[in-house]
Image: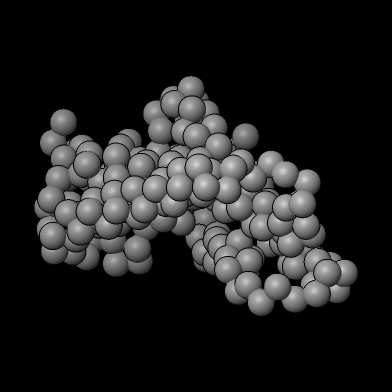
């Protein structure tokens, strides 16, 4: 598949996912009332943001659209080295907190696979979750050097959600040196805009 075809595919997929989530929200609100849960707008905002960014990528950057999507416009901007350490601590803490909450809930309330929990808004929440998993999976495929490792991480994302997301981000941050800009965590190691540590190898 050519670079321009890839770009069209990304635009169509994320636009379609955003429309699907919007339709799900409207349908569920009409049929089951409002849940007053603003977080369900997250995948809609994610898809809208990614689609807008994709439309801003020029034809000269079509060879690697995912890198262009992830790069800052001022990609030479340097961030204080402490931001990498802050990121490591922050995402480690978030991952541990979510893991503790999930384990505690399973112990005290049992597994969530119960008929009474399968409400219309639970279905909307699951759609929300898997759209975000898809968006993160695009990044994981871009980051990983093989399809096997990408598939492994995507399976973990599907099974464990934000616990896996936090663990993956921490691992990527540990691969950066403290002198690297924070945005380098988004890029694959083969990128010409990759980390300074990768350039030295």
Identify the residue at the far right of this view: 31
Q: Residue at x 75, y 67 (%)?
A: 25
Compared to residue 157, the image places residue 27 above or below, namely below
Question: Quick one: quadrant of the C terminus?
Answer: top left
Q: Residue at x 29, y 53 (%)?
A: 93
Q: Position of residue 62 (x, y in %)?
A: 51, 49
Question: Closer to the camera, 60 or 69?
Answer: 69
Question: Closer to the camera, 69 or 33?
Answer: 33
Q: Position of residue 98 (x, y in %)?
A: 42, 51
Q: Position of residue 199 (x, y in %)?
A: 18, 39
Q: Residue at x 69, y 41 (%)?
A: 113
The mark tally for this picture is 0
In the rendered structure, the answer to whether residue 56 lies left or right of residue 14 reads: left
Question: Closer to the camera, 137 or 13?
Answer: 137
Q: Residue at x 80, y 74 (%)?
A: 33
Compared to residue 104, the image places residue 38 above or below, namely below
Q: Tell me if I can see residue 128 in this picture.
A: yes
């Amino acid at each position: 598949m050519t670079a321009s075809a890839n770009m069209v595919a990304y635009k169509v997929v994320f636009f379609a996912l955003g429309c699907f989530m919007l339709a799900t929200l409207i349908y569920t609100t009409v049929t089951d009332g409002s849940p007053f849960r603003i977080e369900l707008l997250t995948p809609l905002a994610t898809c809208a943001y990614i689609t807008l960014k994709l439309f801003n990528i020029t034809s000269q950057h079509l060879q690697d659209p995912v890198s262009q999507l992830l790069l800052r416009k001022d990609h030479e901007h340097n961030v204080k080295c402490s931001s990498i350490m802050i990121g490591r601590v922050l995402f480690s803490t978030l991952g541990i907190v979510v893991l503790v909450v999930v384990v505690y809930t399973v112990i005290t309330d049992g597994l969530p696979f119960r008929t009474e929990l399968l409400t219309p808004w639970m279905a909307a929440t699951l759609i929300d979750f898997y759209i975000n998993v898809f968006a993160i999976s695009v990044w994981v495929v871009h980051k990983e050097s093989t399809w096997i490792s990408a598939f492994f991480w995507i399976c973990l994302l599907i099974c464990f959600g934000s616990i896996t997301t936090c663990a993956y981000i921490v691992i990527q941050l540990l691969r950066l040196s403290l002198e690297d800009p924070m945005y380098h965590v988004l890029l694959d190691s083969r990128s010409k805009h990759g980390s300074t540590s990768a350039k030295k190898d």
